[in-house]
Amino acid sequence: MAHRSDTVLIVAVIAGGVTLIAVVGAVGFRKYQQAAAPSEAPAMLMNVVGGELAALASSGKYTECAGGPYPRLAPDPRRHAWTALGHPGAPCWAALAASPGPVRFVYRVVAGGPSDPVPSPPKSGLTMPSPTGPWFVAMAAADLDGDGDRSSYWVTSFAPGVSSVDPDE
């Protein structure tokens, strides 16, 4: 028959084991979230491409979202709500069917016609081609690890797919 002190010891050992499992699980989950963070931008930018192609099909031009980066002006390592009330670009982002949950990246879409200059994505070193028709450039930037060095992703109407510079920064 177990003594009271044995029962207390068994409960303490079980509680310690459960605590250890919880701590290891929390650390593992945090690492998983950090590893998944860079996948946000390519997925979101492909949504923007879909919205831009729909805009081109319906109006003959691509959509530019005014007001600078969305949903906030500068990237930082924290997640921020997608809906930026009062931001002048909010209706444009809604029209592009972009409505994810909280995001770590900031996004910007620039669009124009054949006579408008095409911006180069940050840190890309690219010289964009001279447009012969409507065009768009969608960009995403984040400082995922908080060291001040940004990850940059972009898509354009000039080339298929998502391109990046320093995707793990």
Image (cartoon, rainbow, N blue to C red):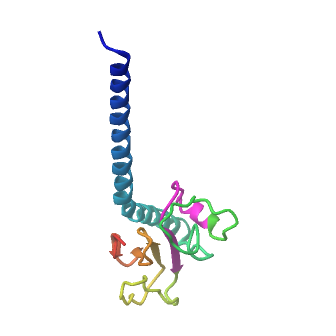
Location of residue 33 in the rendering, given as x and y in whole percent from the top left corner:
39, 55
Q: Is residue 107 magenta?
A: yes
> Looking at the image, which is closer to me, 142 or 32?
32
> Looking at the image, which is closer to me, 113 or 13?
13
> Looking at the image, which is closer to me, 76 or 114?
76
Q: Residue furthest top?
A: 1
Indicate the quadrant containing the C terminus: top left, top right, bottom left or bottom right: bottom left
> Looking at the image, which is closer to me, 79 or 70?
79
Number of dots carrying numbers: 0
Q: Is residue 123 above or below residue 72?
A: below
Magenta span of residues: 92-111
Indicate the quadrant containing the N terminus: top left, top right, bottom left or bottom right: top left
Location of residue 52 in the rendering, given as x and y in whole percent from the top left corner:
49, 67
Location of residue 127 in the rendering, given as x and y in whole percent from the top left corner:
37, 90
Q: Residue furthest left?
A: 1
Answer left or right for 115 relative to 154: right
Q: Which residue is located at x 34 percent, y 26 percent?
A: 9
Q: Which residue is located at x 39 percent, y 84 percent?
A: 123
Answer left or right for 125 relative to 62: left
Location of residue 124 in the rendering, given as x and y in whole percent from the top left corner:
36, 84
Q: Is residue 99 magenta?
A: yes
Q: Which residue is located at x 39 percent, y 87 percent?
A: 128
Quadrant in the rendering for residue 95: bottom right
Quadrant in the rendering for residue 153: bottom left
